[in-house]
Each structure stands twice: as structure tokens, then as C-alpha cells.
Image (tube, rainbow, N blue to C red):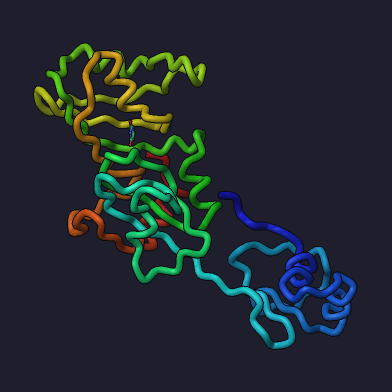
Amino acid sequence: MVSKRGRIDTFVAKRLQIPKKMVRNLIVSEQIFIDGVQVLSADTQIDEFSLIECQGNVLQQRQRAYWMLHKPKGVVSATIDKQHVTALDLLTGVDRDLLHIAGRLDLNSTGLLLITNDAKWSQKLMAPESKVTKRYLVTLANPIDASYIKAFEQGMWFEYEGITTQPAKLTVLSQHQAMVELKEGKYHQIKRMFGRFQNPVIELHRESVGAICLDDNLDQGKFRALSVSEIHSIYTQTT
Ligand code: URA
């Protein structure tokens, strides 16, 4: 999802289905406002959150929205799907316009899923250079041993992408449970990393993304709005 930036004359012409020449006349006759400020130039830039008014009518008004969902198993991290219930289906009573998922989880993974209509925010969150730490609780079929720690730290060659994974932190919690912290999110990354040890992942649960932790009060399938400090946390820190 990319931020919908563009020119005011293009937007108004499309929205009102009038030629751009007519839009320029509206601008000259002081009829168009962006965020309450009169438009002076046809090439003034807008985005999906600009409040746009023309001749006293609101042409665009949208609030930024940020949600955390406790994703259950069997729910697909997608906006639409023919086969499965989607994460967006669970956001009952919410305006779904432009909503998208910021960092997917596999069908059978559970835990923290972030959903927003703010493409700049989700891009920042997921950009590799942001190096935001994602923390997962992982349950394995076979016993884990200390040799895994070094392998995760050193990185693993992923043939398909042609990359070596970034250093990941593995903490052994018990024979069959580990905490894994990643600063990237390659396709099925954790399953593939444990796959190197022929150790299938039984349960995979995301506990946090950066400073945003899954709320203990959210049962599976439930969601809540992010707080202001959670929203801003992605701009102020990279862990
Ligand atoms: N790694 C995986 O293999 N699956 C997920 O859902 C997240 C990380």
C-alpha cells in the first residue's frame, strides 16, 4: 500500500467529473480549500488524509486509523479472501476504507497483527532499514538445544531470496519452547529457520512489534485502537 499523493486539480476533476480547466476556474474564484486553507495553485499536493472542500462541500475527509488485532489461527492476514475469514472481517463496525495489514502472520500463527489505513506509517514500520524487532513465542515438535542460538545469531542462507538472514536472537525457554526476535520478516522465516534443524514449528505467536505489545486484555479475535504513544513509537525507536 502506497500513500495516495497527488495534485489537487487531478483529484477534484476526477471526483466531480469535470475538466481540469473548470477546476482552475474554481481555484481562481477561491472555491477550493485543503485543511481549511484556500488553494492558490492547481499543482498543490494532497494525500489521502487531506480534508478537501469545494464550494462548501466536503470532497474528502478521512481520519487516520491504527488497530491491533489478536489474530487467531485459521484467519488469513489479508483484506479479502475467498476461502478463509480475513483479519479485516474481524474488525466489525470499523470503516475498512484503505485498511491494510502492516506485517503479515501465517494462517496458523497467532498474536499481534497491526492494521492501519496510513500507508506512510506501515511503510516505516516494515522498511528493512527501520530494523523494528518482532518478538515471537515458538513451540517446537522436537527438543531445542543451545546450538540453535549461534545459528540464529549468525544468519542462514535463504536460497530462494539469495540473502543471509539478519542476526536473530533465540532464547531457549524450555525443551520445546523458545523466544525468537527478528528484525526482518522473510516468507515463513521462523519455520524455515527451525526447518534447518528438522524441527517443525507447532505454535507460533507474535508478542510484540517494536514497542507495541499484544494487549493481555485482548482475547483471540478481539481488537482495539492503538494508543497515541504506540502509534508514535515507530518513529522514535527502532527496537
Ligand atoms: N515466521 C513464520 O514462519 N511465520 C509467521 O507467521 C511469522 C514469522
**Residue drawn at point x = 36 percent, y = 27 percent:** 189
Residue 212 image offset from top left, x and y in percent: 32, 50
Q: Along the horizontal axis of the image, is 197 left or right of 39?
A: left
Locate residue 216: give its quadrant.
Answer: bottom left
Q: Is residue 67 positioned above or below 113 on the image?
A: below
State the residue at coordinates (67%, 75%).
52
Residue at left offset 52%, top offset 60%: 98
- Residues 128 and 138: in front is 138
Number of callouts in the render?
0
Up-down relation of residue 216 to residue 38 (above or below): above
How far across and down, in percent of the image, does residue 39 sit?
Answer: 77, 75
When asked about the image quadrant of residue 115, the answer is bottom left
x 29%, y 25%: residue = 169
Q: Give the residue furthest to the front.
A: 83
Q: Quadrant of the C terminus?
A: top left
Please indicate whether residue 170 sits to the left or right of residue 8 in the image.
left
Q: Is residue 193 left or right of residue 216?
A: right
- For ligand 1, give the image quadrant: top left
Vertical placement of residue 58 versus 13, above or below: below
